[in-house]
């Protein structure tokens, strides 16, 4: 998985530093709203991809 390999490339201090920078940039009150938006976006993406997988594939064998 790509995301797990990205986190393996960073050490604990780098992740802490990124979290602190994000906290300073957006503030504590804005982060839950950003995460909610990110979560709903991921959910919509998964639902859309699941709908694509559920569509029946038809092949024309009349030839």
Image (tube, rainbow, N blue to C red):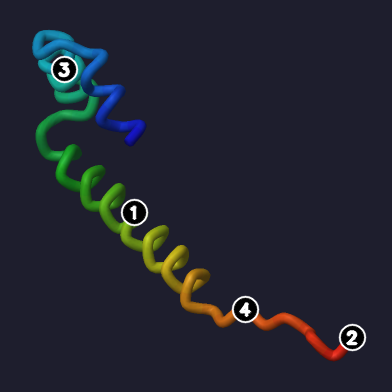
Q: Give the camera-side residue of 42 and 10.
A: 10
Q: CA distance from mark 1 to mark 4?
A: 25 Å
Mark earlier in primary sequence (1, 4): 1
Give residue 25's quadrant in the image: top left
Give residue 6's quadrant in the image: top left
- The reply to whether callout 3 and callout 2 are in contact (CB within 8 Å) is no
Q: Give the camera-side residue of 35 and 49.
A: 49
Give the residue number, with chain letter if any, for mark 3: 15
Where is 26 relative to 47, above or below? above
Mark earlier in primary sequence (2, 1): 1
Residue 12, horizontal then vertical, whole percent: 10, 13
Residue 55, horizontal then vertical, whole percent: 54, 79
Give the residue number, with chain letter if any, for mark 2: 63
Give the residue number, with chain letter if any, for mark 4: 57
Closer to the observer: label 2 or label 1?
2
Q: Residue at x 30, y 58 (%)?
A: 40
Looking at the rendered structure, the secondary structure element under dot 2 is loop
């Amino acid at each position: 998985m790509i995301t797990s390999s990205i986190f393996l490339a960073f050490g604990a201090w780098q992740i802490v530093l990124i979290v602190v920078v994000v906290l300073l940039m957006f503030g504590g009150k804005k982060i839950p709203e950003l995460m909610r938006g990110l979560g709903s976006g991921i959910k919509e993406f998964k639902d859309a991809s699941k709908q694509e997988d559920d569509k029946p594939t038809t092949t024309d064998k009349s030839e």
